[in-house]
Image (cartoon, rainbow, N blue to C red):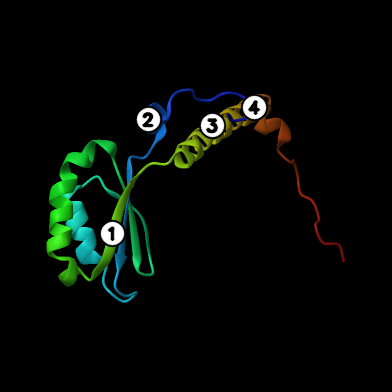
């Protein structure tokens, strides 16, 4: 539901595939001061289209597209092998939740509403501008702004 109307209809897997973001990968570092760049390099080496959504404190979160799951085994293997070197405390992966799906649908509905609103406002502005004649509106002569 969005704006009082049904926006999407389907089973959980259909909705997750259609409106989901894929997988969420969360990596927890041992310490806040441990560098993120080596971990980020490993992730982007295996899944270049991975999107880092958060790198705060000792936690890094990624969105991984659904079609990248065949690359997980190799990526997780390297993360496991280099866990000590990369200073990784733990990591986990989860599928998009239905809550995330509904939030994405809500964003799409809101974006479309903003686009429609902007189009209507542009049409109003165009109508206002169409009747505007600079020569008629031009101030002729001089005027005294400050009087002493």
Disc 4/disc 2 C-alpha distance (Å): 24 Å
Q: Is residue 148 found left or right of 142 in the rendered image?
A: right
* Residue 89 rendering spot, x and y as whole percentages: 27, 68
Label 4 residue SS: loop
Residue 45 visible, this angle: no
Could you tell which of marks 3 and 2 lies nearer the N-terminus?
2
| Residue closer to the observer: 104 or 140 | 104
Q: Residue 141 vs residue 106: left or right?
A: right
Q: Around disc 2, counting alpha carbons within 10 Å, would you say few (fewer than 14), some (14 to 19), or many (20 or more)? A: few
Q: Residue at x 61, y 24 (%)?
A: 5
What label does residue 91 carry, if any? 1
Q: Is residue 134 visible?
A: yes
The residue identified by callout 4 is 4
Using the image, tell me which numbered label, if any, was put on residue 13: 2
Foreground: disc 4 or disc 3: 4
Query: Residue 96, percent across and down?
Result: 38, 41
The image position of residue 25, as x and y in percent, is: 31, 52
């Amino acid at each position: 539901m969005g704006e009082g109307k049904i926006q999407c209809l389907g089973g959980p897997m259909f909705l997750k595939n259609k409106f989901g973001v894929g997988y969420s990968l969360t990596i927890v570092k041992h310490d806040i001061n441990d560098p993120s760049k080596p971990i980020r390099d490993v992730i982007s080496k295996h899944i270049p289209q991975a999107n880092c959504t958060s790198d705060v404190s000792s936690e890094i979160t990624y969105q991984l597209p659904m079609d990248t799951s065949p690359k997980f085994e190799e990526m997780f293997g390297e993360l496991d092998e280099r866990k000590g070197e990369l200073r990784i405390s733990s990591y986990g992966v989860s599928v998009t939740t239905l809550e995330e799906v509904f939030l994405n649908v809500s964003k799409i509905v809101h974006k479309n509403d903003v686009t429609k609103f902007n189009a209507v406002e542009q049409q109003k502005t165009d109508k206002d501008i169409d009747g505007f004649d600079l020569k008629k509106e031009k101030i002729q002569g001089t005027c005294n702004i400050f009087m002493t």
